[in-house]
Structures are given as C-alpha cells and as structure tokens.
Image (cartoon, rainbow, N blue to C red):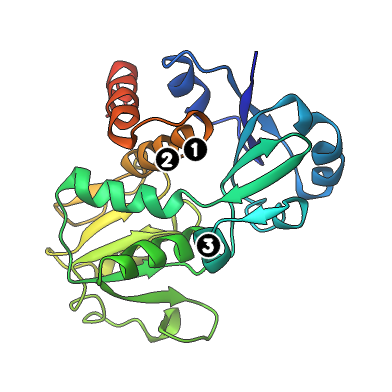
Amino acid sequence: MARYGLIGSPVSHSISPELMANLGIPYEAREVRPEELPAFMSKEALDFSGLNITTPLKEAIVPFLVSLSPEARKIGAVNCSVRHGHLWEGHNTDHIGVSFALRYLGLRPKSALIVGTGPAARAAAFALSSKGIRFLFLSRKPGPRRIAWKDIVPASLKPFDLIIGAAPPGTLSLLSEFLEPHNFVLDMNYGERSEKLPVPGFSNGIPILLGQATASVALWFGGEFNDWAERLVSSAKHMGIL
C-alpha cells in the first residue's frame, strides 16, 4: 500500500496524520533534521509515494529533487513532493493554502504586511502577488519591499488590512501594541492561539493547512481540488479544530 508522510523537525505536534487518516490515507509524521536528510532521502524516502516537507527542510530538500514546479522554483522552497520511481519532483502548495484561507475566511485585503521573510513568507507573497494585493515584509534583515522591525512605530500598521504571521510562533505578540482595529491577523502557525492580540479579526493557520493539504492530496491522487477540500474541511470539523 502506498504511504505518505510529513518530514521536518519538530513534527510531533502535527495534526496532519489524523487529518489524512480521516480520509483513509496512510500518513505519518517523521522527525528528520537537516543533517539526517541525505540518509533519509537515499533510503527511507523510497518507502513513501509522496511527502510533505516542513521546517527546517523546505529549502534543504531542493538538491534531492529531480525537478521543481514553476511555483516552487519562484518561491525557492518545497513543501510537497511526489515520487516517480526513484526520482522526486518538488512542488509548493503553501501559496495555495494562503489563497484558500483568504477565500474561506472571506477576506479581500487591499494591502498586507507579511511578518518574516523565510519560505512561508515567500509563499504568502506569491499568493498575494497572484491576486494583485500590495504587500511588504517585516524583517530584521535588510532587503527590498521590507520594513525593519527597528522602524516600527504606533502608526506603522495603519496602511495594512491584513497581517500575515509567517515567523516562529509568538512573534506576532511583539506587534500587539501597534495593531489597529482594522488589521485582520492571519497566523500561518496553526497551534492554539497563545497571545491575546487586541484585534477583532484573527485566524490561526488551520485554513492554510487545509488548503495546502488539499493541493498536496490532489497532486498525489488526482481529482478535483474542491472535492478534496470539502473532505478535508469535514475532517477538520470532525476533529473539532475548525
């Protein structure tokens, strides 16, 4: 029987195995650190037909793949792979997750601030660009289209309808005193909301997870995106996380 899985570190908190099990898909989360990736890809990976990839492997996985989708190449990161024989192709479905979340939550922002500049942040930027939504990054590192953390002042977040948290859990709490009532906060982390943010609009990353998982399953098995999305949303509601 074909097997599917998630690799990264840490992955013990992942709810993906339960989500997939509700769809009848054999799926497991496997702890793999960057230094363990070469051995995993040369041996254990061949036991799987498809993989999801999470932190800190989204960029490290690229040299082990024979091809990348145009989206993955532009984003510079892979979170989904499909095996053909002994060869792997890489895709990025994180950007689809962000687009799905905006639609699911009924959000139509005109401008957004993305907190972070790593693989998740670049996927969010790709999704926003495809919708013509203006955005800037918030980062400690200099670069194009960026606001520096040191330059944040009380009025800095006023231009943004949407704040996307694409940095480690807890980072958004650093913005608490600067948030405006109209800022909708979408955290790409899907753990329970730990900070009390002073805004009426907030979502954790569950809708993003469902969107990227839907796109992953469609890549592995084929079929219509909307059909898989309906099943995954149903699974999430059954688990009480949506």
Residue type pointed to by label 1: Leu
Q: Residues within 10 Å of mark 1 (few under 14, many from 20)?
A: some
Q: Are dots 3 and 1 in contact, CB under 8 Å?
A: no
213 on left or right of 108: right
Is residue 208 or residue 62 the one in the foreground? 62
Circles 2 and 1 in contact, beta carbons < 8 Å: yes
The residue wearing badge 1 is 219
Q: Quadrant of the N terminus?
A: top right
Q: Is residue 61 above or below residue 9?
A: below
Q: Residue 242: x and y, percent?
A: 27, 29
Q: Which mark is residue 70?
A: 3
Residue at 62%, 53% in the rendered image: 58
In this view, the residue in front, 66 or 18, is: 66
Q: Amino acid at mark 3?
A: Pro
Residue behind mark 2: 215
The structure residue drawn at horizontal position 24% and vertical position 79%, both measured from the top left corner, is 154
Which of the marked residues, 2 or 3, is nearer the chain's N terminus?
Answer: 3
Q: Mark 2, mark 3: which one is toward the viewer? A: 3
Element type where label 2 sits in the image? helix
